[in-house]
Amino acid sequence: MWAAWYAYMQNDVLATGIMSFAMHEIVYFGRSFPWMIIDRLPYFNRYKIQSVRISLYYSFLLSFFKPPSTSETNLL
């Protein structure tokens, strides 16, 4: 399978980069796929620590554009 991939691509560096990226994505999302299923099952809701989840986009924005707290403004 690997030899066929390298023969098809005809560029070792590009073939290795694309296959490494594809393998990384399969492993990354593959490990979280069972938890996405478990998260949808109502039986497991009793074990949740956080009942309301903040969206990833909102938490990303807060990490960069968080308003200063009162303790940070007192230092100035």
Image: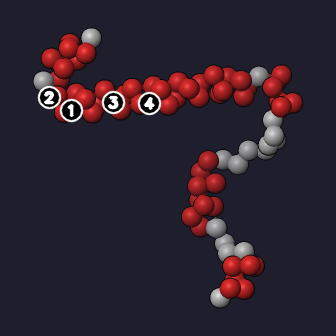
Residue at the disc numbered 2: 11
Residue at the disc numbered 1: 14
Disc 4 residue type (three-letter) = Glu
Viewer-proximal residue, 62 or 72? 72
Is the residue under label 2 in contact with that under label 1 (CB below 8 Å)?
Answer: yes
Disc 1 residue type (three-letter) = Leu
Is the residue under label 1 in contact with that under label 3 (CB below 8 Å)?
Answer: no
Is the residue under label 1 in contact with that under label 4 (CB below 8 Å)?
Answer: no
Q: From this view, report whether residue 20 is shown above or below residue 1.
A: below
> Disc 3 or disc 4, which is closer to the eye?
3
Q: Position of residue 17 (x, y in %)?
A: 27, 33
Mark 1 is surrounded, within 10 Å at the Cα level, by few (under 14), some (14 to 19) or many (20 or more) other residues, namely: few
Earlier-in-chain disc, 3 versus 1: 1
Q: Quadrant of the C terminus?
A: bottom right
Which of the colour schemes (rainbow, by chain, secondary structure, one colour) is used?
secondary structure
Q: Position of residue 11 (x, y in %)?
A: 14, 28
Earlier-in-chain disc, 3 versus 4: 3
Q: CA distance from mark 3 to mark 1?
A: 10 Å
- Residue at left offset 63%, top offset 22%: 34
Residue at the disc numbered 3: 20
* Secondary structure beneath label 4: helix
Residue 51 relative to residue 5: left or right: right
* Secondary structure beneath label 2: loop
Residue 25 is labelled as 4
Q: CA distance from mark 4 to mark 1?
A: 17 Å
Q: Quadrant of the N terminus?
A: top left
Earlier-in-chain disc, 4 versus 2: 2
Q: From this view, report whether residue 54 is shown above or below residue 75.
A: above
Q: CA distance from mark 4 to mark 2?
A: 21 Å
Mark 2 is surrounded, within 10 Å at the Cα level, by few (under 14), some (14 to 19) or many (20 or more) other residues, namely: few
- Residue at left offset 81%, top offset 25%: 44
Q: CA distance from mark 3 to mark 2?
A: 14 Å
